[in-house]
Amino acid sequence: MTIAAQAKMEWKDAHKHPPGFRARRGLNWFTVGLLYATFYMCRYNFRFAGPGMREEFGFEARQIADLAAWFSLAYGTGQLINGLFSDRIGGRATMLVGAIGTIVLNLVIGFSPFTSSFSTFALLWMINGYLQAAGAPGMVKTNAAWFNRDERGVFAGIFGFMIQSGQTMISLLAPIILNGFTFLAFVVGPGQWRMLFTLPPIAVGLVAVWFYFISSPSPDEAGYPKAIHDDVDNSAGTTVPILESFKFVFSNPLVWFYAVAYACTGAVRHASDQLAPLYFEDVLGFNMKTNMPEIAVGTLALIPMVAVAGSVFSGWVSDRFFHGHRYPVAMFLYFMESVVIAVAATVMALHLISPSAGGILLGCLFLVLIAITANSTHSIVGAAAPMDIGGKKMAGFAAGVIDSFQYYGAAIGLFITGRMLSVSEGNYTYWFGIMTCFAFFGGCAMLSLLLRQKGRQAASRAVIALMVLLLAAAAAIGVPNYRAQKTAHEARIAAEEAAAAAEEAANPTAATAAPAPQAPAK
Amino acid sequence: MTNESIPVPVTPFQLKLKDFCVWIETKFERRLSRFGFALRMAIAAAVFYAIFHLQKTWLADAPGALRFASWLLFGWAAFWTILEIVRRFHDLGRTGGLFWALAIPYWGIWKVSGLFHLADKFPELWWPWVAMLALCYWPIWLTLQLFFRNGTEGPNGYDGREFYQDLGNSR
């Protein structure tokens, strides 16, 4: 027998489960994952509504990016709080509360006329962000009880699949809604972006009912006692007091390394996800409001699918070759990501990405490559690592803390990117450039953890010092650059307005000209 | 942290679900010969062809309920096909998880060819097909094995003997 075959047999013997267990776990995972996927439909509907909102309310790219940033802040905070609650009330209950909340919020946005003001919409969208944040900790906590440590990497990849399938569902559904359709007596006209907030909640509702009946918080409660060994706490039950969870997770240094890295994942992932439709419109010249081109729909649908392949593969590699340690694989992925995005930034700066056939192909290809690397780190750092750290009883809060940083990172990334896009008149080289910096920073965080775990404390600290220096340098260079561009941008706008006013005064148009005197009635 | 084990109550519905899952698993944990597999794949191909043909012709303007029923039939046929492929892998002494190694690349070819209308542009634009088939050499190799390779002799861990023994002990 070869070494590989021997290892395979040993793996099989170590993972023998009772009859029916794998099918039951598959059903449970599918149910939990499907609910989480539908959560995504009520979150990613926003990016498709963006162009329509921009046209209807005159929102700028900066405001659209700000909305996404506010959502991310609320979501991140929600992760922290809901993670803690999920360890107390269980993952299943947490997910159900989140599902009901997001249904209500989306329907309110879809049906209310008062969502036209920026601040009202931002407020509602932030509340939705908080409620959506019940999904990830609930899902991670439930699945932590169903998987052994060295099975979780692949699970994390599949977790990525469920997320991406939610994105795919809304990516396929949104063009249908925006193009307009008829279903029996129900008629939706083209360009009705509010429908993006009224139809996806129906899917969440249906799946939540299925979830309520089928899902089980642990194998013990599904009739499979002692089927899984938990490295952290193998006693019965899946809930712990809030304080115990808080102390355990906050005092674990591993959590903080992963949190910093995950913030970088968030900055890249959300910047590429949320701003892709605007990039399609501004750089590739697509019409994203009503008739989306096939290549745009195809790319947005293809991105999740290729991302899944990367997620599953990276999870499998960390399970099989690194004994469930996630950081070496994550480090490699972060550095690879920074190289890919740096190349994209260079290509963009050379004006090779444009509305030409070759330019569109390049533009779409880079989005796909970024998605593979960003989502691979998202799966193993965001799903597998918290389960390894917290076990079945505290995975919820561990996931909450780590995942919250993803959204804080996203908020910072979107905040910076939105402003740079605004003052640079839509120069998307900045978009790629900012993402490159975050990806490199994430790689450094994982490198530091790797060195620390190998006992090389001094080298680990040196990497941390380098990260601090990088941050200081970015602030020292970036802030003056932004201020200079902002001044130039404002001067340009003022000049344009003055020119328009002068032209208006010279040649009054019909709208501004005084009404012609009426002919006297006979 | 403690390691004591306290029995957790299980609801009757969860026990029924457990029985259902055991039943489902027994469907996968068996072998399938080359001839049986080829016969079943031929039937599956005929069923899929019939469903798609009906959807394009008779059901094109049919009420939504009928079209939905045709998709339900499609779902059942797809599940049955996956089941047979997994059983054939088990006959070869390999894991049924390899089904994904077949499904994902073939699905990828189908999506990419559809996105760029490669079927319409063939044979003028032949090289993307060659490139995609070269990338899929392993799934193609697996497919050939499914149809032509002889199954293993004796117990191989997937033919259900061990599984049924475990099942007897667990009841």
Image (cartoon, rainbow, N blue to C red):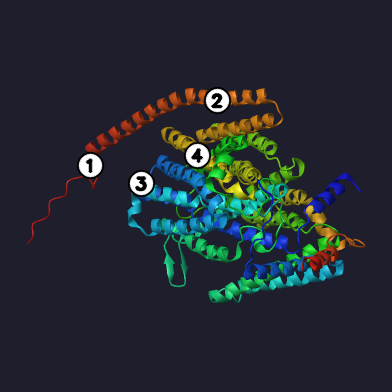
Observer-side mark, 1 or 4, equals: 4
Residue B166: image x %, image y %? 81, 64
Q: Residues within 10 Å of mark 3 (few under 14, many from 20)?
A: some
What mark, if any, has residue A408 been given in the picture?
4
Which numbered disc, 3 or 2, marks the residue that appears first in the sequence?
3
Residue A23: image x %, image y %? 71, 62
Residue A464: image x %, image y %? 60, 26
Q: Residues within 10 Å of mark 1 (few under 14, many from 20)?
A: few
Q: Chain of mark 4?
A: A
Q: CA distance from mark 4 to mark 3?
A: 21 Å
Q: CA distance from mark 3 to mark 2?
A: 35 Å
Residue A325: image x %, image y %? 70, 40
Q: CA distance from mark 1 to mark 2?
A: 57 Å
Which numbered disc, 1 or 3, marks the residue that appears first in the sequence?
3
Observer-side mark, 1 or 3, equals: 3
What residue is rendered at 46% in x and 68% in y? Answer: A182
What mark, if any, has residue A118 been given in the picture?
3
Q: Secondary structure at mark 4?
A: helix
Whether residue B4 is situated above or below residue A63 in the rendered picture: below
Which numbered disc, 4 or 3, marks the residue that appears first in the sequence?
3
| Residue under numbered circle 1 | A508
Q: CA distance from mark 1 to mark 3?
A: 32 Å
